[in-house]
Image (cartoon, helix red, strand yellow):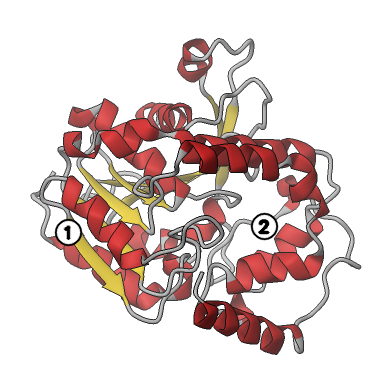
Amino acid sequence: MTTARTASITLAFLSLAACVPRYSALPPRPFAEIPYAGPSGQPWPVAFRELPETARAYGMARPPRVAYVELGKGGPKGTLVFVHGLGSYLKFWWFQLDAFAAEGWHVVALDLPGYGKSDKPASFPYTMEAMGDAARELAASLGATRPIVVGHSMGGQVALSWAIRYPGEVRALVLTSPAGFETFSPREQAWFKEVFSVALVKSTPEYGIWGSVAQGNFQRFRPELRWLVEERVRVVGTPDFDAYAYAQVRSVQALAADDFVRQSLGRVRAPTLVVFGEQDRLIPNPLLHGGSTRAVMAGGAAAIPGARLEGLAGCGHSVQLDCPAEYGAAVRRFLAALPAP
């Protein structure tokens, strides 16, 4: 990370820290009690479904049960499957689910195994391929044939794994600040295994969560998004928090080690949009090797046949929350250019 970049993050955090509320004194709130609703406050209909095919594929004694939201079933434009990133859950598509459903899309968003309201079994491998299989099985069980898969960060790498291994099943990809393009050396992969642990996730103080969420992921963090921090702070110490922390650790290790996706980008056959924030502070990894976000995204897009690259100025890593208007416009331009289903 450059000195200037470090200084800007530090100054931004200090200015934020002076006026933020404190949530650690509030009662704990488990994932099951977190409200799932968009900006209007209208609750989303959360449902659950078991994934027996995924269980069989990975030798699990019991099928994992995933939570999901389905809106606009029968929408004439086709299906959008939204896949969240590391440490998050389907609510990170806060601005998008209702909006796209209202425009005629069949919208499906899930909590991946290990995250949000879904089961968090230790027997699930938490690889990008396993999570891709989970999302694929859920979509198929809901009658979503040839969906457009919209993935953020880790969810982008999950979407790529799905599209690479089952090329005829994906109509298009919207890769939002995707993981999967950045290369990690064997030494860097070993660093992840040594440093990123369940104990580290559990011991992160509230100010650290403010820093990682509000400063690490955003350029335009604002009060309407404080629920992101509150929910993360209040879930600490709840019954399934340890399992959630374990899922994150396994996911980080899989993200760094997943050379299959990086080496197979040329096998993607679905029309692809790569959309990212030009001021992304997480990709490339600032602790290990740094570099340019645009260079990473451009390199990945160049490896995918016909991929379209769009960077959004003044936007951070969680670009769909940071810059929802610009992000929505970019996605809609791409979707409008696709052939009819």
Name which residue lies at 42% across and 34% down. 258
| Percent x, y of residue 192 | 60, 42
Whether the residues at callouts 2 and 1 have beta carbons within 8 Å, the answer is: no
> Does residue 274 sit above or below 115 in this rendering?
below
The vertical placement of 203 against 331, above or below, is: above
Disc on res. 308: 1
Q: Residue type at mark 1: give it.
A: Arg
- What residue is shown with label 2? 35
Residue 321, numbered circle: none
Q: What element does badge 1 sit on? A: strand
Q: Position of residue 75 (x, y in %)?
A: 28, 49
* Residue lying at 77% horizontally and 71% vertically, measured from the top left: 207
Does residue 133 sit above or below 294 in this rendering? above
The residue under the point 64% across, 39% down is 249
Which of marks 1 and 2 precedes in the sequence?
A: 2
- The residue nearer to you, when weighing 72 against 299, is 299
Q: Secondary structure at mark 2?
A: loop
Q: Between 292 and 14, which is closer to the camera in this rendering? A: 292
Residue 256, given in percent of the width and then of the height, sits at 48, 40
Residue depicted at x 51% and y 83% = 4
Image coordinates of residue 204 in percent, x first then y, are 78, 57
